[in-house]
Each structure stands twice: as C-alpha cells, then as structure tokens.
Amino acid sequence: MQIPDKLPTHVSIIMDGNGRWAKERGKERVYGHFEGVESVRAVIEAGVEWKIPYISFFAFSEENWGRPDAEVQTLMELMGRAMLAELDNFMEHDVRFMVLGNRARLSDALKADIDKVMGATAANKGLTMILFLSYSGRWDILQAAEKMAHDLIEHPGRPVQPEDFSRYLVTAGIPDPDLLIRTSGEQRISNYLLWQTAYTEFVFTDTLWPDFRKEAFREALQTYALRDRRFGKIK
C-alpha cells in the first residue's frame, strides 16, 4: 500500500454514520457505535505504522447529551471499556492517550478510567491519540476567553496576539489539525474545533464510519497530499 510522501502532523476525524450503518443492517444504533470502535483501532494502527504524530477523534459533542438516555449511557460505558481494553496496546506501541472536553457531566467512573489511561500513557513518545469528549468549539472558545480575561485583569496592558489566545484552549500545546476528515457524506464541522481549524484542509467522504478502515484513511491522506496549502499567502 503506497503512502503519500506528504503526511499531516495532526489528523482529526469527525466520526459520523454509526447509526445509519446499523440501521442499514436492521440493528439498533448502538451496534454501529460498537463497530465504530474497530475503525478507531484501524486508524490508530495505521497512524503508528505511518508515523503520524497526532490523530484526534470527535467522539461526543456537548449537543450529543440531548440524545436518548439509553444511547448516551451505552456510549459512555463503551468509551470507558474501550480505552481500558486498549491500554496494553497503547503501551506496546508507545501511544500517548488524551481526552479533552468539558468533564463536568461525565460520571466519576468514566473520569477515573480516563485518568488511569492518560496517566499510564503520559510518558509515551509515539503517536498522540486524542478523544474529544463532551466537547464543543463554542464552549472551548468561551472558557478560553474567560481564562484570558482573568489573566488580563491581573496583567493589564499586555498586548494580545492570536497565538496567546490559543494557549487558553483545551488544545494548548497541540498543533492545529492539518487535515480534518468527516465520514458519512455530511459536509459541516458541527461546532468542532472552530478556532483550531482556521487553515485546516477538509476531506469529506461518503464512507460511513464503521466502514472507514486503513484503505479509506490512506485515500484521505492522498487527497490531502495533493492540496496546495498557502495559509492566505501567495507562493
């Protein structure tokens, strides 16, 4: 399998289509979420093989809390079990695991699972895998603005640059995505990484997330490799 010469530093993925994938097979929506875990594993394995430094996934938005309680509970339990089940693989392949988002509505049990896996992998130096959980771009910008305002009150007169604001986002220290992939044919970013994707390249694919495996990932990377990124400048 030929890999493009120009690979992104940070790939972020909006995982969409789990429910439709399950419905097409006459199953409950949650069945698609279970199968979607296999796609996450396949993408991370490819990222490790191809030496992509950062891969992030939009796992659960703040708006998703409005879904039926049974589905939300199943999703949260699935994420907790999946991250614990992958811990040995993370350690074997030197993967650092992170969860970013608003933890206020997460259960104590899930927060404990997150802390366990993040703590165990914190010193790993290979690929960084990020789950955005209970996250929204507007919330991220708001909480960053509140932190920055507090600091400016304590240090008045300090000039403010865009890069200064980035330090208050939950992604502080993480490079902005070079490539954002959204599956299932939808062409929107759904309140995700609104600040961070200012100059991100977008690839939209009709593939439903449970069907998105290594070859589909490679195709998205190939599309990215053909892009001419100018960041608003003239080359």
Image (tube, rainbow, N blue to C red):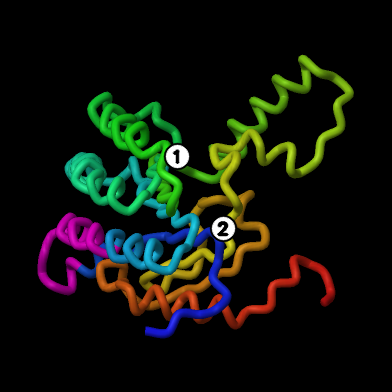
Q: Which residue is mark 1?
A: 100
Q: Is residue 169 left or right of residue 19?
A: right
Reply yes or no: does residue 36 show up in magenta.
yes
Question: Which residue is found at the position 28% from the left and 50% from the top?
Answer: 92
Q: Which residue is mark 2?
A: 177
- Disc 1, disc 2: CB below 8 Å? no
Main SS, magenta region, reads: helix
Q: Amino acid at mark 1?
A: Leu
Q: Amino acid at mark 2?
A: Pro
Question: Which residue is found at the position 55% from the left and 78% from the top?
Answer: 5
Q: Secondary structure at mark 1?
A: strand
Reply yes or no: does residue 109 show up in magenta.
no
Q: Is residue 200 left or right of residue 180?
A: right
In this orientation, which residue lies closer to the viewer: 204 or 12? 12
In this orientation, which residue lies closer to the viewer: 131 or 146? 131
In this orientation, which residue lies closer to the viewer: 18 or 225? 225
Which image quarter: residue 213? bottom left
The percent coordinates of residue 151 (x first, y second) are: 72, 21
Q: Residues within 10 Å of mark 2 (few under 14, many from 20)?
A: many
Q: Is residue 23 above or below residue 131?
A: below
The magenta segment: 22-39
The percent coordinates of residue 7 (x first, y second) are: 54, 71
Question: Which residue is found at the position 37% from the left and 49% from the top?
Answer: 95
Sequence order check: which comes first, mark 1 or mark 2? 1
Q: Is residue 114 left or right of residue 26?
A: right
Q: Is residue 71 left or right of residue 121?
A: left
The image quadrant where one finds the N terminus is: bottom left
Q: Secondary structure at mark 2?
A: loop
The percent coordinates of residue 91 (x first, y second) are: 30, 46
The percent coordinates of residue 20 (x first, y second) are: 25, 68
